[in-house]
Structure formats: structure tokens, C-alpha cells
Amino acid sequence: MSGFGDYQLEIYLDGLRGVVPRYPMTFEGWEEKARAALEPSVWSYVAGGAGDEQTQRANVAAFARHGLVPRMFVGAKERDLTVSMFGMTLPSPLMMAPIGVLGLCAQDGHGDLAAARAAARSGVPMIASTLSVDPLEEVAAEFGSTPGFFQLYTPTNRDLAASLVQRAEKAGYRGIVVTLDTWITGWRPRDLSTSNFPQLRGHCLANYTSDPVFRGLLPQPPEEDMNSAVLHWAGIFGNPLTWEDLPWLRSLTSLPLIVKGLCHPEDVRRAKDGGVDGIYCSNHGGRQANGGLAALDALPGVVEAADGLPVIFDSGVRSGADVVKALALGATAVAVGRPYAYGLALGGVDGVIHVLRSLLAEADLLMAVDGYPTLADLTPEALRSVG
Ligand SMILES: Cc1cc2nc3c(=O)[nH]c(=O)nc-3n(C[C@H](O)[C@H](O)[C@H](O)COP(=O)(O)O)c2cc1C
Ligand SMILES: CC(C)CC(=O)C(=O)O
């Protein structure tokens, strides 16, 4: 049974002892503190999105159009947030979305390791990005008993793709998340106006520079000539996959295969027919395509088309209430991106844990107050559309 709401009690008890909270309690507070803590170019890279960021704002605004209807006489004294998917049971449906510049968000430069340590201590699984400062093996070594997932940006070189997946399998990852919506970077004015794209400065390429296949493509080892390594990386990074590639992707691993970036029901049906194990409904936090649908508005159609396959959702989740609403619309698990990156910026491992615990505490307390004690109680009927 859930004790996530106890975080509130801990904070009040600390207050009685004169200990003031170290970190803010809302997304706006995390964002403000992170902005002050991060280098301006890193801040704008993380906070920004595509175009004039209308989709990014729509992602957040969509949650306010749904309201949870309170139920009384339920006696929701105990809540159960455990979720089973891909043959594993997780203490809650919250996950950390893959973030490719975590290293730049951490004071010691090892943000991937910090997030993995936060996963170990909080039980919230991390989906480790291909674009990391710390090699995937070192990240996995920090997961403890919390299952970890590896996110694959599929390179054009198939041997390299296979090598990354095999390394992830060997390192103990429990699923492969293939991101489909970012084989090319979207139009990002904030980064363009400052010519800021961290990967082109050689950041977050540890999984490539540590890979035997990638190293074999280089004229000289990356330690001797990082410029060539970056150029090679830029040349092979993005693979505009088509449906013809799905059988090959599927053949790469016997681990659960989850495809990230699906918003159209027809794509979900085809992916399901192609043998994927899970669907990840996301518009990349509005970072890739502007002028698009809020991800939350795509979720019900995705869930229906997934027809029983687990659906992970992200994009725009800023609070525990948002987590609950996405679950009510049918998500099996809900991931956050920027919120935990900000947690990392403001307090390293502890900052990430604070963000995750705050989201879970709010979700748990909302389920208590509104009389929805289990995830099974959270159905679309629990919500009303409000405008
Ligand atoms: C700075 C940053 C880097 C990201 N890097 C990756 C990545 O490497 N792989 C990936 O699949 N998604 C990446 N994403 C997208 C997230 O996984 C996720 O879809 C998005 O952040 C969710 O939206 P939210 O930030 O509103 O929670 C990144 C997002 C941010 C903010
Ligand atoms: C564009 C990628 C290289 C990294 C990413 O996924 C992101 O910044 O959103």
C-alpha cells in the first residue's frame, strides 16, 4: 500500500523542528531555481521547445481542461499505486523520461549517474538516454533494484544500433525504448539564436565514444580527435526509420521493445501488429514539432488503439494531479522530463528525489481526498471535460 503521501507529513514534522524545506514545492519553483542554477545556454536548451513553443504550452494547458470529480464515502485510507507492466511490478506508475543533456544539468557533470541513483533510492525507473555523459554500463550499475530502461536513438549504421542494444542487454536494462520522433532536430529558435546545440560541442556522446563499432568508424580514437568523432556522430545519428525497418528493430532484442513518439492511432495499430511490447505516447515535450496537438489530447486514441498493450505517456506533466489525469485517460505509466532535470539542477540526487516524491505525494493524496484508492478506479469516467 502506498506511503507516498507521507512525504507531506515529513515536511510538516521538519517544519515543527524548525527545518525549512530545502527545495520549492511546485514546478514553477523548481523551474525558477533551476534557471538560476544553470548556465543560460543549458537552461534555454532544457526549457525550450520548437517554434514559438505553442505545442509546448498546449501540452501543459491540456491538463487544465480535465477535472477529477471527487467521490465521497469511499474511505480511501489506503491507496495502491503499484503497476505491472512488461512482466515487472513497479511501486508506482511514475517514470523518468530520457533526457540527453543530464550531464550539463548536474554540478559535477554526472547527471546520468545522479538520476540513476535517484531511481535506485526512489523506486522510480529511469529511461536512460542514448545521449549521455556517462556510459550506459555505468548508469545501469547505479540502478540498484529499480528496473532501468535504455532509450535508443537509432543510428543509420545498423551494426552500431545492434551494438548499443546488446550493451544495454548485457548491462541489465529491462526494456528498450526506441525514439521515433527525433531522427532530425526540430526548429528550435532559442538554440538557433545562440548557435547552441550541446551535442555538436561533443557533449553527451559517451555511449558512442565508448562503443567498439563507433570507434571502428573513426580515423583516430575520440581521445585524440574529438572533432572527427563529433562529425561522424552527426553523420550517423539520425535514421528516418520506416515501417520496413520495424522487423529489424524487433529482431535486435528479446527485451520488451517500446516505441516512443506515437500519437496517431493508426501508427499504434501498425506498431502493435509489428510486434512491439509497449507504446510511448509523447510529442517530445513540444521540442520537436510546433503547431501540433497537445500530447494529452492524443492519449485516449492511443490507448484505444493499443488495445491492452502498456502505454507510457509524457509531455507537459507538471504535478501529481497531472499524473492522476493521465492515468485516468488510460496511461499505464506517466513519465516526466523537465521536472526532474530541474530537480537535478537544484539539488543533484536529492533534488531529483524531491521532485519525484513531491509528484507522487500529491498524486497519492489526491487519490485519497477524491476517493480513487487504486489505479483501476482511475478511468475516464473519473474526469469531466472543463472547457
Ligand atoms: C533537455 C531535454 C533532452 C531530451 N533528450 C531526450 C533524449 O535524449 N531522448 C528522448 O527520447 N527524449 C528526450 N527528450 C524528451 C523527453 O524524453 C520527454 O519526451 C519530454 O521531456 C517530456 O516532456 P516534459 O519535459 O514536458 O515532461 C528530452 C527532453 C528534454 C527537455
Ligand atoms: C535532439 C536530440 C539530439 C536530443 C533531444 O532529444 C532533445 O534535445 O530533445
Image (cartoon, rainbow, N blue to C red):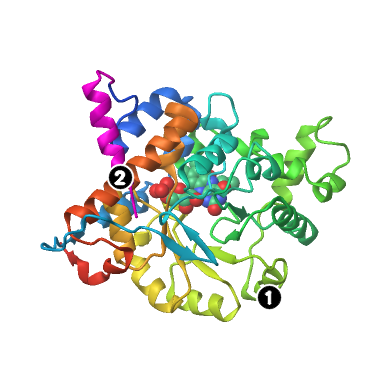
Q: Is residue 181 toward the left or the right of residue 224 in the image?
A: left
Is 248 positioned to the left or the right of 38 in the image?
A: right
Q: Amino acid at mark 2?
A: Ala
152 on left or right of 166: left
> Which portion, as a residue range, is magenta?
1-19
| Numbered tag placed on residue 141 in the rendering | none
Residue 58 is at least partly visible in this image: no
- Of the 4 image quadrants, the one containing the N terminus is bottom left
Name the residue tied to disc 2: 361
Q: Is 18 part of what is drawn in magenta? A: yes
What residue appears at the point 23 percent right and 30 percent down from the top-left corner? 12
Residue drawn at x 67%, y 71% as measured from the top left? 250
Q: Earlier in the sequence, mark 2 or mark 1?
A: 1
- Residue 170 placed where, x, y %? 74, 54
Label 1: how many Cα within 10 Å (few below 14, some 14–19, many 20+): few
Q: Mark number for residue 247?
A: 1
